[in-house]
Amino acid sequence: MNWHSLATYELAGDKRAGLVVADTLYDLAALGRACEIDPASLPGDMNQVFARWAQHAPLLADMAGRAAQLATSGKLAAVDAAATYAVPYQPGRIFGVASNFYDHADEMGTKLAARSESQPYAFMKAETSVIPTGATVLMPPETAKLDWEVELGVVIGQRCRHVPVEDALSVIAGYTVFNDISARDLNRRTDYPFTHDWFRGKSFDTFGPMGPWVVPAGCIADPQNLRMSLTVNGETMQDGNTSQMIFSVAEQIAYLSRILTLQPGDLIATGTPDGVGMGRGVFLKPGDNMVAWIEGIGSIENAVALEALAAR
């Protein structure tokens, strides 16, 4: 399958679905017309794509394979360069997997049980936290320890329950880059006997940069062998590989699906390698700029600014 990605772009205040082929963004509806496809058979947005992934994926892959030739023949034009990438789609739910890299657990001082005696540790992050590449992460006044975490984002493409590990990759629609922004000083509490509060520390608005698009699963040969990195102001902070995960992508899906029914559009943030700010004793500050990158997918870039509290 030729590499392509599924995107949502914004131009003149209008958000539209697009396909990216060979670094060129094409409007999905325009590409459909050039391919002489019935407009009624095309999804209106990317959430509709994932809602019926089995139906739409082959069609979009075929369109992506024809895009370059159609552009060369003058039947298709790239989207205007003034367009910006929006969030590729709106996740229904976001599941995070904590301490899923041994080196990251070590730098955080987390004592883990033997893998044979353990299971993935999952938590939920608010879906309203997501922002696109180019948008600003807002640092709330409640935190002084804002941190970064590059993660492989897995997009579920079908409703499923009790998925065996050996079949788990088949329920994936695609992959994206996710930056699990965390307020480390809000991840713990002293006012309750429940000392961890990852929901609070990770769910503020803007704490979920993702994108710049979703790459279909068929374009990624092995999700367990992807290099991943994150820089702050041009300095490399994280440089790891998904092969270092404690629990694989397939194992995470199998675990979650034993608890609940996974739905199309659910997003799993599968864990981060070492190199986060907490482990270094360095935290984000206003004016900082992050670039999170994953091999085979791409990169997202987000600046940091203080949150300006509006009058209520």
Image: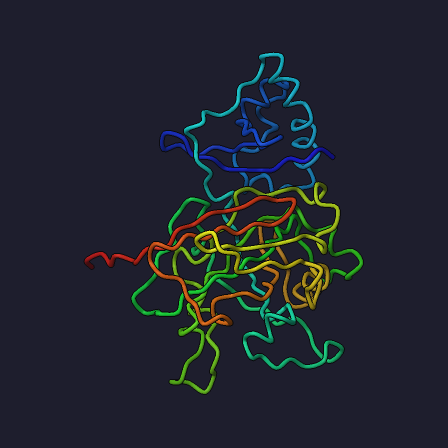
Picture coordinates of residue 196, whole percent (x, y)? 48, 78
Q: Residue 47, located in which quarter of the rendered image?
A: top right
- Residue at the image point whose x is 36% and y is 33% from the top: 13
Pick the quarter of the image with the C terminus: bottom left
Which residue is at the far bottom? Answer: 193
Camera-side residue: 248 or 89? 248
Residue depicted at x 62% and y 12% = 73
Depth check, front residue: 6 or 29: 6
Residue 61 at x, y = what percent?
68, 32
Residue 304, located in which quarter of the rendered image? bottom left
Outermost residue toward the right in this view:
166
Seen as rendered, the residue at the extreme front is 235
Count every numbered label the image shows and give the total.
0
Residue lying at 48% horizontally and 44% vertically, measured from the top left: 87
Q: In front here: 129 or 160?
A: 129
Residue 135 x, y percent position in the rendering: 40, 47
The residue at the point 61 percent across, 37 percent down is: 5
User: Could you say where residue 181 lies in the image, as x and y percent from the top left?
Assistant: 46, 61
Q: Quadrant of the N terminus?
A: top right
